[in-house]
Image (tube, coloured by chain):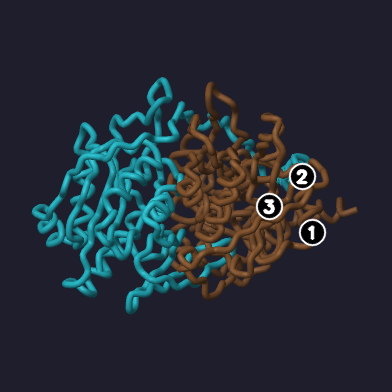
Amino acid sequence: MKVLCCVSHVPDTTTRIQFTPDGAALDRTGVTFIINPYDDFVLARAAELKEKSPTTVQVTVLCVGKNGASSADSVDGNLRKALALGLDEAVRIDAEAKDAYYVARQIAAYAEGKNYDLIMFGKESIDYNGSQVPGMVAALLGLPFISYATSITIENGKAHLTREITGGKEVLECPLPLVLSAQKGLAEWRIPNVRGIMQAKTKPLHVLPPVEILPRVRTLKHEPPPPKGAFKKIELDQIDQLVEELANKGLI
Amino acid sequence: MSAIAVWAEVSEGRYKKPTLEALTLTRQWADSLGLPVWAVVIGKELPTDSQQVLGDYGADRLISILDPQLEPFVNSAYARALSELIQQKAIRYIVIPQSYNGRAVAPLVAIWADAALFSGIIGVPEKEGEGFKARRIAYSNKGFEWVYTAHLPLIVTLKANAIVPAKNSRTPEQESFSFSPKAEDLRLKPIRVEKIATDKVPLTEAEIVVSGGRGLKGPENWKIIEELAQVLGAATACSKPVADIGWRPHHEHVGQTGIQISPNLYVAIGISGAIQHLAGVASSKNILVINNDAEAPFFKVADYGIIGDAFEVVPRLTEAIRKYKAQHSH
């Protein structure tokens, strides 16, 4: 079985996000970049599948991105970390992720004709939160798409899945090949062991040129959230007034 | 003739809040362009109140795409139906609620209908030069992004709770659009739905959310959260550590890796406000923080703060709300 895990290279979850003075881009100074946390669920699930059937499962991890100026902003570094979980090979499409459509077309162009049985993504990246790329790749490749998957098991070429829906979950079946986007639950996050880290150093990491695609959506500018003034401090004997105020604002 | 189409998603036989919000945004966008609104309903049958509800929220036309195979929901079949409609009627603007199913449908339509996609916008798209711009939340609530495209068709998905549903009554004309899903669009087979046993509103749709953290010291103490939620008609939530140690079920976890919410009022009790938690809740319109630690980072994003012991504050708050509601119930 061939598995393709697609990951994003994003600012660490604890980063204080700041934009360049013109708002055009993220200020990358001093920012550490990590693999998108939702993509970590996908890598962990792939590692489980690989562990269970080491000879028959082949896992590729792919990222569309350019290495930044510092070692804290290295796509290749993050791909090596993914490989350290026991995955087989990494691919970096050497291009800036211009928009979701551009990224989806790059991934689809790479995957086309390679007969992946399972293509997995995190449900969204924590930078642009778009939830667009997985579905677009599925549509481009003509494969079924399961969004917000919280579990997948595979038996005889058929996948049994659950996905998160409003107020609960849905149980589904789908023949392979398929594309999914992962929500928390797909697998427990893993930390690579020393052996995995050593082995990852010599695993193949292919850097490929992008295909020529025009993006469709561009960012005009970013804005920081409006500064929040000091909160209104409520003393214990003012709770009645607080309730009154919340009610007057139509909140309760 | 052109129009703005909106997918009026039916969930459990009804048009719920995400659909009413999408209809409202569509009406406003359509008015700015001088176009009519076409509400598109996909499923096995039309809910009986369709004409009424869709008309109330501004639809000029109700286009139904009905087929026995369109129940239960399968994203590719719904996306195919929308794509065919868009192409046959040369529709240039499409609005989709950013619900779970909306997220599963929109990217497929973007490819099949050869459209641009703005996802999770929080306001009506505005004309800008040759194209449109719209505002959305990015960096997990740590910033906003203005996106732009001159590509048509343009699909937008609307973030939940970003706008307030508003009536704009009219009587929609009805039309049916003929469509049957092909086998390749039904490869994915829904088996069953497992609802979380609760009479509460789903977290993502709730107007008020009451949330507890480690400050509550143990699962046995959640009664004060439940009681406050009950008197407010709120959904309950919790922080990641609380879900991880098993005090509360995982489906209540809100934050960066849990469920992201933006209710009108978020009440955070005994939650310090780690940056990962804030990433999931910071777009709440009003935040009330109750914490005995005056230095808790959550106070930095709070609108209201009560510095005090949750076990003392929360029951008093519950009682005060109960009293207020009793006095104002007539």
Q: Are marks 1 and 3 on the same chain?
A: yes
Q: Quadrant of residue B42?
A: bottom right
Label 2: how many residues lie within 10 Å, few (<14), some (14-19) or many (20+)? some
Q: Colour of chain B?
A: brown
Q: Nearer the viewer, residue A217 or B254?
A: A217
Contact flag, marks 1 and 3 (Cβ < 8 Å): no
The residue at 29%/36% (across/down) is A212
Residue lying furthest bottom: A156
| Pointer 2 with pointer 1, Cβ within 8 A | no
Q: Amino acid at mark 2?
A: Ala
Q: Chain of mark 3?
A: B
- Residue A68 in view (yes/no): yes
Q: Are marks 2 and 1 on the same chain?
A: no
Q: Which mark is residue B49?
A: 1
The answer to whether residue B253 is above or below residue B138 is below
Determine the secondary structure under disc 3: helix
Kindly identify which chain the residue marked by label 1 belongs to: B
- Tell me where residue B124 appears, x and y as whole percent: 62, 34
**At label 1, which amino acid type do we have?**
Asp
Residue that label 2 marks: A247
Res. B17 mark: 3
Residue B182, label in figure: none
Gap between marks 2 and 1 measured at Cα: 31 Å
In this rendering, does residue A73 appear at all?
no
Quarter of the picture holding the N terminus of chain B: top right
Q: Where's residue B69, x and y in %?
A: 59, 69
